[in-house]
Image (cartoon, rainbow, N blue to C red):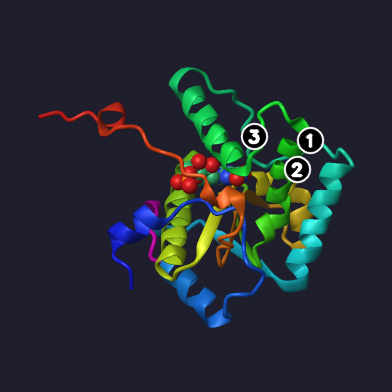
Amino acid sequence: MMSLEDAVRNRRSVRGYLPHEVPQDRIEAILTLAQAAPSNCNIQPWLSHVVSGPALRDLGARLVGAAQDGVRPNPDSKADRTFTGIWRERQIDAAVQLYGAMGIDRHDRPRRDWAYRRNLEFFGAPHAVFIFTPTEFGEREAVDLGIYAQTLMLALTAHNLASCAQGALGLYPDIIRDHLGIAPDNKLIFGISFGYEDPATAANRARVGRAPLAASVTFHR
Ligand SMILES: Cc1cc2nc3c(=O)[nH]c(=O)nc-3n(C[C@H](O)[C@H](O)[C@H](O)COP(=O)(O)O)c2cc1C
């Protein structure tokens, strides 16, 4: 098994996958590892739905169809803030790296739209996990869900699998609830596509950096 440092450094968002599926026992081992994530009062507020095979293919078709038909996104958690200053600079840099790797000009709206729509097809991944939580939960439980999601992605990396966290998979929660038979009192936070990386996908050559320590951390004594 990979060291923690290697798992942290090797994990990155992968946006192109080979079609073959991960064996079910491996998926279960990874999700069992992710269950070890800490949470406030150990409430473990994550309700994960793993979707594969025809269910995933048909769901992708419904999501893409909704986007093509101009259905208004209706995410359970609104994230309509626009970034400014350093936050905006980092957002732009990530987009520049991604579209640069894909050879898409920033003014090429049709290709940018196509690249974004690939989110809704799970970037060709054979599996996606949708992370839900009861509607009554708020910010405090959202922290638990973030910790859980990173634990899950590191577990995937340690098993030599690729993943991509996708807020975009939270745009049409009503379709996803309907498709998977999930009750309306479960809200969707986001989804994570996962599987085997396709090394031939141009988007997978994108690398984003990180701010230096001093930009994020202050020491006091
Ligand atoms: C909560 C969350 C939501 C994200 N949503 C998307 C998304 O919808 N589509 C996408 O392509 N990447 C998405 N990302 C990936 C980020 O763009 C990526 O993590 C960031 O640029 C850092 O790159 P890295 O993951 O390769 O280290 C998301 C990441 C997180 C943590």
- Please give the name of the residue rendered at 52% of the width and 35% of the height, measured from the top-left corner: 94
**Number of the front mark, 3 or 1:** 1
Q: Which residues are magenta?
A: 35-41
User: Which residue is the extreme one toward the top?
Assistant: 85
Q: Would residue 85 be found to the left or right of residue 70 on screen?
A: left
| Mark 3 / mark 1, whichever is N-terminal | 3
Please say if the residues under marks 2 and 3 sit with CB atoms less than 8 Å apart: no
**Number of the front mark, 2 or 3:** 2
Q: Amino acid at mark 3?
A: Lys
Please say if the residues under marks 3 and 1 sit with CB atoms less than 8 Å apart: no
Q: Which residue is mark 1?
A: 110
Q: Main secondary structure of the magenta part?
A: loop
Secondary structure, mark 2, is: helix
- Please give the name of the residue rendered at 67% of the width and 31% of the height, measured from the top-left corner: 105
Q: Is residue 172 magenta?
A: no
Toward the viewer: 203 or 88?
203
Q: Amino acid at mark 2?
A: Trp
Q: Is residue 29 visible?
A: yes
Please say if the residues under marks 2 and 1 sit with CB atoms less than 8 Å apart: yes
